[in-house]
Image: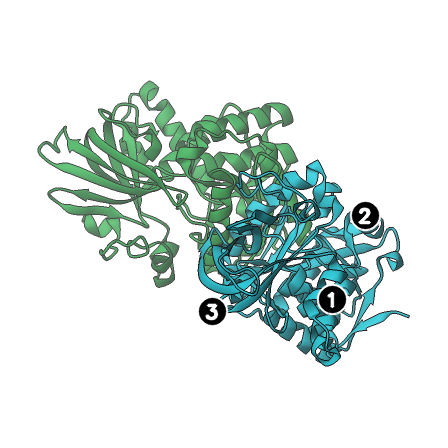
Chain colours: A cyan, B green
């Protein structure tokens, strides 16, 4: 029996993906609105298990690219993601069998649901990161030798750009400049790949994990259970810190939302301070006593201390009571090639990556 | 009888186009080398009269985009212009009947000759400006409603960008950023149009005019005539100033070569000074006594005082003895629409355009 994404369970997908999105991936509300409207107009979307994608079928991920701080202000029209998607199909000369989320981040997990509904395509239960990351080349597909290009980029004015590059780093460079030129955000279709490549190189079943996380958080209160405990059980995660947000610095830099948040300890963390550094996503969490308690590529997520609802980096504000959690990333990211792409040193941190389960033995 | 562009007459085309290029359009030497090598490898290029292009045949101009100061340092590989050209043909889904120069500027008049030789296509005896201009939308084709996009852009590394934009101004914006991202210069195929549109909206027979100018300058010494007099007769032009270059300021700004040159008067202009302001091309010539003696869209060109060889803005240096000439632009540029695109006010000069023949009555 295939599962459907409907207006009833959409919230769970969005909430769970925002937890996996580690603060980035954009405002879940914007993407959810887009997906909701598309499902209302075109009907529910089939969530397709990766094992059901034929080996030679074409999977075309769809995403928004830009600074989340801009995306909140500049609502997409909805037509630009279709324009990008269809332009890529034309360029490749093959129809897509399904679409997919390139990242399990708030907005970018729901944007492809809108595309799937509008084009009557299934959404594959997978993504390219198992979390969110700020740059185009930062997907496990890169390690599988899958090219980010041809990539099609479209804006709400009707402009479009079709990229073919010699590396995924060049794809990032051109796409980033284009997103800035397009006003800070744009819609893209990228990393077209086959069913066979999907099963080998993507992060599988991350959408159903997101839905489970969202459902857990939504129903915890009724079930009189602690949603954080359940979330940690679902994700093999760790409670890192509890406290009050006392400072948030953020700026938009080179098309990214970059900054730092400080959390003052409470509820057993009294007298301590946690510093979160982010570039769209949270990258490093430092405890004033324990030092680094989690770092990329492992997941760091800030939750509302009461409801366990995830808070994105652009949603962080002074005074919030928060629970910070850490979760292990995919083993694909823990290889040398993975750490070269998304390890702390790529983000210019002078720290060696230590898997979160070793930090919390 | 159709005329051929060969390694024997190539110099004349390049020299004449550099005169019409008003200081811009890039180093003629680089483009000439490319064309020469292509003709040696693939044979001469047919120069096709505009009347010989079928009404529905596709003409695809080919050009280099970027700052001439960069182009001198960063030699193209030769494959990128073919990549851009063929990508545009694929995108449009129609084979080109001929290629064309988008501007009558040093390098951009000869780049399409190389493309024509390599692809065994004729070169139409026409261009999109009748001179050179710095920005993508500044062609008479824009006034004819012909779109700059689809535009294909390629670099020497193998990256390519295919643009579809809602206006030629947006095309300029995306293409300019891409040229900067590609290292300051790149090859483009743009403004695809039909034979019918060509005859109505392009500047016709500017390539054969360039050849005549080049031939005149080359043979003047042997014929014991004044090449400047002959050049002015061929172009209905005016002698504006003679003197010695005493100052050149230039900088690369937003992908353009921007600056100012000062010429101290000699040979009848003693005690006066001419100031030339340029953005890739010369835009305004001011005489310290007579005021503005020529401005865009009319042509302003600096020639060697002895040989009448044209000097590009990046070739201007202290101490050169020069003859400055002015020539009327196409009537297409003197319309309201034309002046809006390329008049002095577009370039932020607070002067009204006065046709050069009125300034020199």
Question: Which residue is disc 1 drawn over?
Answer: A230
Residue drawn 72% across and 75% down?
A220
Circle nearer the N terminus (1, 3): 1
> Which label number is shown at residue A197?
2
Point out residue A144 in the picture as x, y percentages from the top left corner.
76, 42
Residue drawn 10% across and 43% down?
B289
Q: Which chain carries label 3?
A: A
Look at the picture and state if B30 lies above or below B50.
above
Point out residue A142 in the picture as x, y percentages from the top left corner.
70, 44
Instruction: Report if residue B64 is visible in the image.
Output: yes
Which picture quadrant has residue A22? bottom right
At numbered mark 3, what does the secondary structure look like: helix, strand or loop?
loop
Closer-to-camera residue (A39/A260): A260
3D distance between C-alphas at marks 2 and 1: 32 Å
Point out residue A217 in the picture as x, y percentages from the top left corner.
70, 72
Closer-to-camera residue (A199/B312): A199
3D distance between C-alphas at marks 1 and 3: 25 Å
Q: Mark 2 lies on which chain?
A: A
Q: Mark 1 lies on which chain?
A: A
Question: Which residue is disc 3 drawn over?
Answer: A319
Is residue B86 left or right of A234 when viewed as pictured? left
Q: Are marks 1 and 3 on the same chain?
A: yes
Circle nearer the N terminus (2, 3): 2
């Amino acid at each position: 029996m295939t599962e459907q994404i409907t207006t009833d369970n959409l919230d769970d997908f969005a909430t769970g993906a925002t937890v996996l999105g580690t603060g980035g991936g954009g405002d879940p509300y914007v993407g959810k609105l887009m997906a909701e409207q598309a499902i209302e107009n075109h009907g529910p979307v089939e969530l397709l298990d990766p094992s059901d994608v034929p080996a030679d079928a074409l999977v075309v991920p769809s995403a928004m690219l830009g600074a989340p701080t801009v995306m909140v202000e500049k609502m997409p029209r909805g037509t630009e993601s279709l324009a990008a998607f269809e332009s890529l199909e034309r360029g490749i000369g093959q129809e897509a069998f399904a679409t997919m989320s390139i990242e399990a981040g708030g907005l970018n997990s729901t944007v492809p649901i809108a595309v799937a509904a509008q084009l009557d395509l299934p959404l594959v239960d997978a993504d390219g990161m198992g979390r969110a990351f700020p740059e185009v080349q930062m997907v496990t597909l890169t390690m599988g030798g899958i090219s980010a290009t041809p990539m099609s980029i479209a804006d709400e004015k009707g402009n479009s750009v079709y990229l073919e590059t010699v590396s995924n780093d060049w794809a990032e460079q051109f796409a980033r400049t284009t997103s800035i030129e397009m006003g800070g955000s744009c819609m893209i279709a990228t990393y077209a790949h086959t069913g066979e490549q999907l099963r080998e190189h993507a992060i599988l079943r991350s959408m159903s994990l997101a839905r489970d996380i969202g459902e857990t958080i939504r129903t915890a209160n009724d079930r009189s259970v602690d949603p954080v405990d359940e979330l940690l059980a679902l994700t093999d995660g760790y409670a890192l810190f509890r406290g009050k947000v006392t400072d948030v610095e953020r700026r938009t830099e080179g098309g990214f939302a970059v900054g730092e948040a400080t959390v003052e300890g409470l509820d057993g963390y009294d007298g301590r301070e946690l510093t979160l550094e982010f570039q769209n996503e949270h990258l490093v969490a430092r405890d004033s006593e324990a030092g680094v308690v989690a770092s990329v590529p492992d997941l760091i997520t800030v939750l509302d201390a009461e409801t366990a609802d995830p808070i994105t980096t652009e949603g962080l504000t002074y005074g919030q009571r928060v629970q910070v959690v850490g979760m292990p990333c995919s083993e694909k990211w823990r290889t040398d090639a993975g750490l070269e792409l998304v390890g702390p040193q790529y983000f210019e941190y002078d720290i060696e990556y230590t898997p979160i389960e070793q930090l919390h033995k």
